[in-house]
Image (cartoon, grey):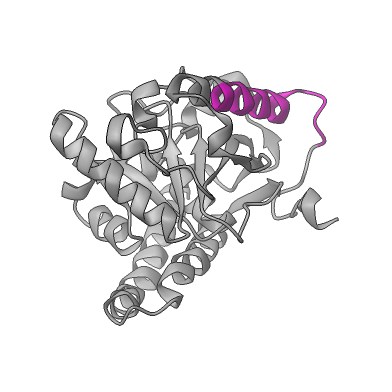
Amino acid sequence: MRNSRAFLLIAAFVLFTVPLMPVQLLLRATGSTAARRFPHWYHRQVCRLLGVSVHVEGKVADDRPVLLVSNHVSWLDIPVLSAVAPISFVAKSEVAAWPFISWLAKLQNSVFVDRERPRLVQDTAREIVARLRRGDHIVLFAEGTSSDGNQVLPFKTSLFAAAKPRGEDAAGIEDGIYVQTIGLAYTHQYGLPLGRRGRPLVAWYGDMEIASHAWDLLKRGPLDVHVHVGEPVPLSDFADRKALASFTQEKVRGAVAGILTPRRAVHAPGEAIQDKASR
């Protein structure tokens, strides 16, 4: 029965996704403003299809360029965060070579970074800066990898190179750019708390193979994920990368701890949490 569920969900995902890929390709090729919003709509449908209920507290600012700094737990983070707001991601260069997934990442206008080649890292940083200046919302997974879902790993200062460049590239970069933090945690499956032992079953980390992990996870049933979005803070408020990394790490860890506290209200699958900003 569980295998049937996973098979049907994957089949439905492919049948839903493949016909829409040329649509997004056309939107990007024509320079349509809808190319930025379309993945947001698409991932909201994907979350519904996969049975992932996204509960959001706070709001991503839509009137200014924002660097979103988030923790990273699973491959599911991509559709979850994309369902929250129109965004793009900073992804490691290996993703660009993954079958099928690379196409989805490119269609969402992801920025690929090769951390092993310093010269290319600088070029990537300039690309991120240019995108932010155009008003894009870009997500940075500041841990540099994914965790087991029970903790937030230390943030890597070097990953903030685009936000706080040094030397000549630093001139005027911060003007009008903001930073928001995102803390996310998977809390329930079939409406039951995952707990400390259950959360690593959702997490995709270490040397796990993505296809087998996706199959096992989809067999388990519907999930609830909570996303806490912090208030926007001007990038210019931070003296350097270390200050930015320290601030965002503290905020994200606090948000995740708040989500996972046992005193937090339990929300049934499918129930939406109204953004505080809209109350």
Q: Looking at the image, is 163 positioned above or below residue 105?
A: above
**Is residue 42 visible from the viewing direction of this image?**
yes
Mark count: 0
**Is residue 4 visible from the viewing direction of this image?**
no
Q: Please tell me in which quadrant of the rendered image residue 225 appears.
A: top right
Left or right: 196 in relation to 26 = right
Left or right: 215 in relation to 243 = left
> Whole-percent x and y of residue 37?
49, 69
Q: Looking at the image, is 198 positioned above or below residue 97?
A: above
Q: Please tell me in which quadrant of the rendered image residue 193 appears.
A: top right
Residue shown at the point (51%, 26%) measured from the top left:
244
Residue shown at the point (50%, 37%) measured from the top left:
69
Front one among 92 and 149: 92
Front one among 88 and 127: 127
Q: Quadrant of the C terminus?
A: bottom right
Question: Does the magenta segment cover residue 146?
Answer: no
> Whole-percent x and y of residue 138?
44, 49
> Whole-percent x and y of residue 227?
63, 42
The stretch of residues the image draws in magenta is: 247-265
Q: Please tell me in which quadrant of the rendered image residue 215 appears.
A: top left
> Whole-percent x and y of residue 172?
42, 44
Residue shown at the point (50%, 55%) measured from the top left:
82
The chief SS type of the magenta part is: helix
